[in-house]
Image (cartoon, rainbow, N blue to C red):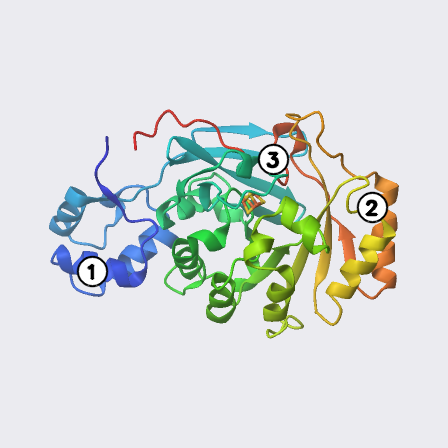
Amino acid sequence: MNSLIPLIGMTLGQLQQVAAECGMPRFAAKQMCRWLYEKRATDISQMTDLSKPAREKLAKRYTIGIEAPLSQAVSADGTIKYLFRGCGGRAVEAVYIPDGERATLCVSSQAGCRMGCTFCMTGRYGYQGDLTTHQIMNQVLAIPQSLSLTNIVFMGMGEPLDNLDAVMQAIEILTAPWGLAWSPKRITVSSIGKMPQLQTLLSQTKVHIAISLHSPLTSQRAEIMPVERAFPIKKVLETLRQYDFSHQRRLSVEYIMWKDVNDSPRFAQSLARLLDGLECRVNLIRYHSSGLDTGEPQCSDTETMEYFRDRLNQLGITATIRTSRGEDIAAACGMLAGKPDNTDSK
Ligand code: SF4
């Protein structure tokens, strides 16, 4: 078992402490950042602008920390699902989605999830633990397509705002000049609307936000998303109204469609009323059945979804139907479950 501490996932401030501890000058932290996040070193010995004794001292306690995926599955549509070591005995998944000029990575923030949404495979498996910033950044840095990624979405396993500190630190590394120096416009954090963490994310970052809404009716939403009882969507939307989504930052509203559950014109009307005046775009998502339950609701048919989209557009709400990706490898929205992770000994 490797007891060395990973450097990947550390901020400039944390690396300054590491430098001090190893007797290096403060500026060595910036040099380490460059090796970790720009030059993508895989071994401390490659950090050639640090003195040899400094590298040797560093390597006694630390490691770069890049951990290759445990396995991968490739979809017929080019989507690739990577399995990574997680925690609590469960692996986590990251999904690479190439789409023309875009190459998006959907990352996980927790092993499992404790939010208990009834339609979600991750939710069904319960909660095994929070990922560290190292484990989140490793998903981004360890895949072969890492250097060609254009976008990152926190829409994999887990509720990102239930692991806010690690997610915020990952966002800092992704966007800082000493990190990957990405624009926050390339990052989207998806949430079911956990407060007050949503306010922290909104005020301390400029990333795009996606809110999982799925039903405009309080009682129905509470049934499928227990979070509604603690943080009603109406309150979440009130908070979102205090921020500007008309320029640099985008707000999307995710709406999974189930046949005869939430897909009638009445629902389109209620949804439009709920979102009235809010600068956002609604993504209508096909439901991907887990195949575990015979009584499980089915996905709405294409005509119904198109009608629903058109109705929303008529009511002044921009809506599109999101293309499903990676369904054949269980990588599509709501299908991520992870597998038992035999390599994890925690
Ligand atoms: Fe958790 Fe998101 Fe699944 Fe809900 S939909 S259980 S928040 S992973």
| Image quadrant where residue 138 sits | top left
Q: How would you rate the neighbour count of disc 3 (Cα within 10 Å): few for under 14, some for 14-19, many for 20 or more?
A: many
* Residue hosting label 2: 305
* Residue hosting label 1: 17
Measured Cα–Cα span from mark 1 to mark 2: 54 Å
Residue depicted at 43% across the width and 35% down the height:
84
Q: Is residue 20 left or right of residue 214?
A: left
Give SS at disc 3: loop
Disc 1 or 2, which lies upstream in sequence? 1
Please state, as top left, top right, bottom left or bottom right, where the C terminus lies in the image: top left
Tell me, yes or no, if residue 140 can be seen here.
yes
Q: Which quarter of the frame holds ligand 1? A: top right
Which amino acid does the dot numbered 1 rest on?
Answer: Gln
Q: Is residue 61 left or right of residue 313?
A: left
Q: How would you rate the neighbour count of disc 2 (Cα within 10 Å): few for under 14, some for 14-19, many for 20 or more?
A: many
* Residue hosting label 3: 335
Residue depicted at 58% across the width and 54% down the height:
229
Give SS at disc 1: helix
Q: How would you rate the neighbour count of disc 1 (Cα within 10 Å): few for under 14, some for 14-19, many for 20 or more?
A: some
Tell me, yes or no, if residue 192 can be seen here.
no
Which amino acid does the dot numbered 3 rest on?
Answer: Met
Q: Please state which of the two labelled residues, at mark 1 or mark 3, is closer to the viewer.
A: 3
Give SS at disc 2: helix
Residue depicted at 20% across the width and 65% down the height:
26
Mark 3 vs ligand 1: CB below 8 Å: no
Q: Position of residue 127 (x, y in %)?
A: 45, 39
Q: Is residue 314 left or right of residue 345?
A: right
Disc 2 or 3, which lies upstream in sequence? 2
Q: Nearer the viewer, residue 338 or 68?
A: 338
Q: Nearer the viewer, residue 251 or 233?
A: 233
Above or below 172: residue 337: above
Q: Position of residue 6 (x, y in %)?
A: 28, 45
